[in-house]
Image: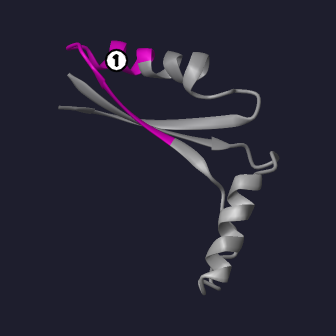
C-alpha cells in the first residue's frame, strides 16, 4: 500500500483572491511579516498495490484528470510505502 501526498496550487500568473483575503486577515491579526500568500489544496490518498511505478503513474493520472485543473493549477506529489 502507498500513501500519496498531493499539493495543488494556482499557477503564478493566476490571480488568487482567496490567498489575498487570507493575507489581509493575517495582517489585521497582527502578523505584519506576511508579504504574500497563495492558497492551495492538499490531498492524501491511500493506494492499494505493490508496484511503486504503477502507483506513481496512477497518482499522476489522477492529478491530471481530476485533482488539478491543468489550465490554472500545478501539482506536486510525494509517494511513500505504508
Residue 51 picture location, percent across and down: 25, 14
Indicate whether 69 appears above or below 76.
above
Q: Residue at x 75, y 49 (%)?
A: 12
The answer to which image quadrant residue 36 occupies is bottom right
SS at circle 1: helix
* Placement of the N terminus among the 4 image quadrants: top left
- Image side of residue 73 versus residue 67, left or right: right
Q: Residue at x 70, y 27 (%)?
A: 70
Query: Which residue in the protein does label 1 denote?
Result: 55
Magenta extent: 42-58
Q: Residue at x 66, y 72 (%)?
A: 25
Classify 10 Å Cα crowding around label 1: few (below 14), some (14-19), many (20 and above).
many
Q: Which one is nearer the viewer's eye here, 52 or 4?
A: 4
Residue 50 picture location, percent across and down: 20, 14
The answer to which image quadrant residue 44 occupies is top left
Q: Which one is nearer the viewer's eye here, 18 or 63?
A: 18
Residue 6 picture location, percent across and down: 45, 36
Number of numbered labels in the structure image: 1
Amino acid at each position: 500500500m502507498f500513501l500519496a501526498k498531493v499539493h495543488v496550487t494556482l499557477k503564478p500568473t493566476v490571480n488568487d483572491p482567496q490567498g489575498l483575503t487570507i493575507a489581509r486577515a493575517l495582517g489585521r491579526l497582527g502578523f505584519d511579516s506576511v508579504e504574500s500568500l497563495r492558497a492551495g489544496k492538499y490531498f492524501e490518498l491511500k493506494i492499494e498495490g505493490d508496484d511503486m511505478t504503477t502507483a506513481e503513474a496512477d497518482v499522476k493520472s489522477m492529478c491530471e484528470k481530476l485533482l488539478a485543473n491543468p489550465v490554472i493549477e500545478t501539482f506536486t506529489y510525494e509517494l511513500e510505502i505504508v
